[in-house]
Amino acid sequence: MFKKVLIANRGEIALRIHRACREMGIKTVAVHSLADSSAMHVRLADESVCIGPAPSKASYLNIPSIISAALVTGADAIHPGMGFLSENAEFAAIVEAHGMTFIGPTPEHIHIMGDKVKAKETAISLGIPVVPGSKGAVETEEEALAVARDVGFPVLIKAASGGGGKGMKVAHFEGELKDALHLAKAEADANFGNSQVYIEKYLSAPRHIEIQVLADGFGNAIHLGERDCSIQRRHQKVWEEAFSPVITPEQRAKLGKIVTDAMGQMKYRGVGTIEFLYENGEFYFIEMNTRLQVEHPITEMITGLDLVEEQIRIAAGAHLQYKQEDITFKGHAIECRINAEHPETFVPSPGKIGYYHAPGGVGVRVDSALYSGYNIPPHYDSLISKLIVYGRTRQEALMRLSRALDEYIIDGVETTLPLHKKLVKSADIIGGNYDVHWLEKMLNMS
Ligand code: ADP
């Protein structure tokens, strides 16, 4: 097992990884930018190294600085967390080339799945159903039109290197296609340095259903059930549930088997999430994330597993310690992503936290690095806390969430807590009747 892990991330996820390491008896090294010197993960880690100025490019994305910090402190592994360098195949290879372990999949698998065009081709070759669309990337207006006519309007143009909902444009009819293509290409280039795009049929009322997998690189893979992440704004998740209110145990077992067979065949290593859209009883693959997900805690709540611990064990060379039949699912879990943003305009609201009080009690978990007096820097993602609740039934989870939201106090900045208070009381959410377009429609009406 590793003796010392460098955590190449910040915020709640850096703290989450630190906690798993501590429980495994592994020492931790925090890295931080100048803006994060008083962050909670820095305070709690065994050692910390400043890796550059506030902008991510100069710090959390600064590979030479991170590698130097790891070498200087004698870390034997690097955990990339999520975002930043977590899906950067080159970084994974550089870590390995310096004699340390990258806690994640092989650089090859990160590379294949990071390119959504290649990922879709791989999914098809492994027998996973995909959203109908272009075979590979689309370059010209003529090609785009041919694909769109073939699958039928509306269509969605998506960035091959996309993430975080960026570089996606809908064309509802032929007249919109040309502009959508050029806009998507420009946005993809600006955000990801790669203007390659592809086209998919735009589904009108899908749910976002994703399967969590755990695999050891020796051909063994298990699934940990699904998460329903259909409550989204601008294609970004806001609220997640495990299980989905609409998926049956038979569907779960069937999809789980397709996915674990595929992961076993690939000899995938680590945690991974296979994302699908679900409409009219059919599942369509959209992408695979080769890292821990923001919403991983809800899977932990219904399985009792610690996904970060499993991830670290696998990276250290262990075989999977569970078979599929060892995994038992219990109860229902919900996660609310709380952002430092105005709850109606969604304008970011960085700044100093005044009074801070997190909810507690049975079945309540708060994954956050906030504390009274903490200053939220303006340079990074606005996610500041994840409120996770567990209940024996979905109804109990909803009631618990409602009371936990009422207890939560974050003074000094605007947060999206009021939005979640509205969501938990919504008849559609209580009834489980929502799709990926539901929240945007609700926001436009209010
Ligand atoms: P990203 O990598 O940017 O997160 P994804 O491919 O995972 O992009 O899609 C993010 C979200 O965008 C999905 O959860 C869904 O809400 C929406 N979306 C993606 N593809 C489609 C599609 N073909 N039809 C309708 N909505 C889609």
Image (spheres, rainbow, N blue to C red):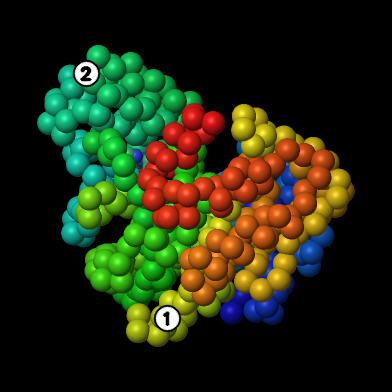
Q: Is residue 251 left or right of residue 38?
A: left
Q: Position of residue 98 (x, y in %)?
A: 57, 60
Asked which secondary structure carries label 1, the reply is: loop
Label at residue 399: none
Q: Position of residue 195 (x, y in %)?
A: 38, 28
Numbered disc 2: secondary structure: helix
Q: Quadrant location of ligand 1?
A: top left
Q: Nearer the viewer, residue 343 or 182?
A: 343
Tell me the kind of residue under disc 2: Glu
Q: Residue at x 35, y 84 (%)?
A: 325
Q: Is mark 2 within 8 Å of ligand 1?
A: no
Q: CA distance from mark 2 to mark 1?
A: 49 Å
Question: Residue type at mark 1?
Answer: Thr
* Horizontal relation, residue 46 to residue 289: left or right: right
Given residues 177 and 243, the one toward you in this image is 243
Depth order, front residue of 414/28: 414
Q: Residue furthest front?
A: 427
Quadrant showing the N terminus:
bottom right
In-front residue for pair 223/2 = 223
Q: Residue at x 29, y 37 (%)?
A: 204
What residue is drawn where x is 62% and y is 71%? 363
Image coordinates for residue 119, horizontal then vertical, percent: 30, 49
Looking at the image, residue 177 lies above or below residue 224: above
Answer yes or no: is residue 108 visible: no
- 54 to 173, vertically: above or below: below
User: Which quadrant is the C terminus positioned in?
Assistant: top right
> For mark 1, what is the residue?
328
Circle 1: is it few (<14), some (14-19), or many (20+) Cα within 10 Å?
Answer: few
Can residue 129 be seen by looking at this rendering? Answer: yes
The structure residue drawn at horizontal position 66% and vertical position 43%, both measured from the top left corner, is 418
Residue tagged 2:
174
